[in-house]
Image (tube, helix red, strand yellow):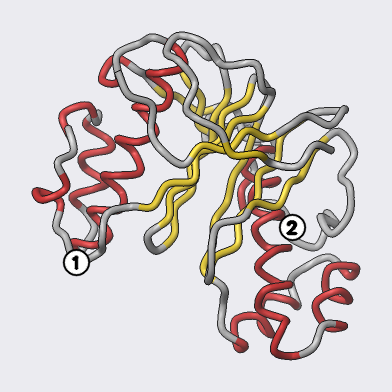
Amino acid sequence: MTSPRDTGTPGAGTPGTEHVQVWILRAPAASRTVPDLDLDLTVLDETERRRMAAFVHDRDRALYGFAHVALRTVLSGLTGVAPDDLRFTRAPCPCCAEQHGRPVLSPAPLEFSLSHSRGLVLIGVAPTPIGVDVELLPGPKAVEELTRTLHPAERAEIEAAPRDARPAVFARLWTRKEAYLKGLGTGLGRDLAVDDVSRAVPGWQLTDLSAGPGHAAAVAVASPVPHGVRIHRTLPTG
């Protein structure tokens, strides 16, 4: 497939010419509290505000607020709908058919996914189901424990790596796995040992992303043919 490429932000009112678009954004410093962030939190809906208020630490509230305002800013730029007029619902879960699958726009002219981890925010947008994930590189104990839950081929790849390289190998596979499961709409409710994301998954495109030192990231999009991934590192303006 075409390698991810960095580019400027697309104009408002159009999904762009690329099949997959990803925003990799650095959140404000964790030491800054929510009132200092200069965010228009009024665009968030009641559910988002309630979830944001539930965080104990200022840094977590700040990251959540930034991520969700950024998501609304991106989707507004692509659809032409004002950020506070965007409405979200849930697709049916593939495991049980209840309405707690992946989040979708209502109405849904495009699909999206959101992930954030310790200072980084990932937003993915595509015309077909999409999932993104970004994670901090884990410690050796977490790698050892979580590797046991994965597909045998994934376990073999991690265990074959030098011990000091295993956190990075694990994180690459874990973010691919989470992105894929988010795209499916099952999340971690699906057995982690079922799918092998160390290689191509039929009907899906899995792409590793460069998220900088200390992080791993990936995007998964439902697509039978390869497409380019357009990377943005700033939010749309105007």
Residue 170: give x, y in percent of width and height: 71, 72
What element does badge 1 sit on?
loop
Q: Quadrant where the C terminus lies?
A: top left
Return the mark for residue 191.
2
Residue 200: give x, y in percent of width and height: 89, 47
On the rendered structure, is 69 left or right of 199?
left
Residue 179: give x, y in percent of width and height: 65, 48
Q: Nearer the viewer, residue 91 or 197?
A: 197
* Circle 1 crowding by C-alpha within 10 Å: few under 14, some 14–19, many from 20: few
43 over 170 or under it: above or below: above
Q: Which numbered disc, 1 or 2, marks the residue closer to the eye? A: 1
What residue is drawn where x is 71% and y is 55%? 177
Q: Quadrant of residue 84?
A: top left
Which residue sits furthest left?
A: 35
Kind of residue at badge 1: Ser
Residue annotated with mark 1? 31
107 over 175 or under it: above or below: above
Q: Nearer the viewer, residue 28 or 53?
A: 28
What residue is drawn where x is 62% and y is 33%? 230
What residue is drawn where x is 66% and y is 44%? 219
Q: Quadrant where the N terminus lies?
A: top right
* Circle 2 crowding by C-alpha within 10 Å: few under 14, some 14–19, many from 20: few
What residue is drawn where x is 43% and y is 23%? 75
What element does badge 2 sit on?
loop
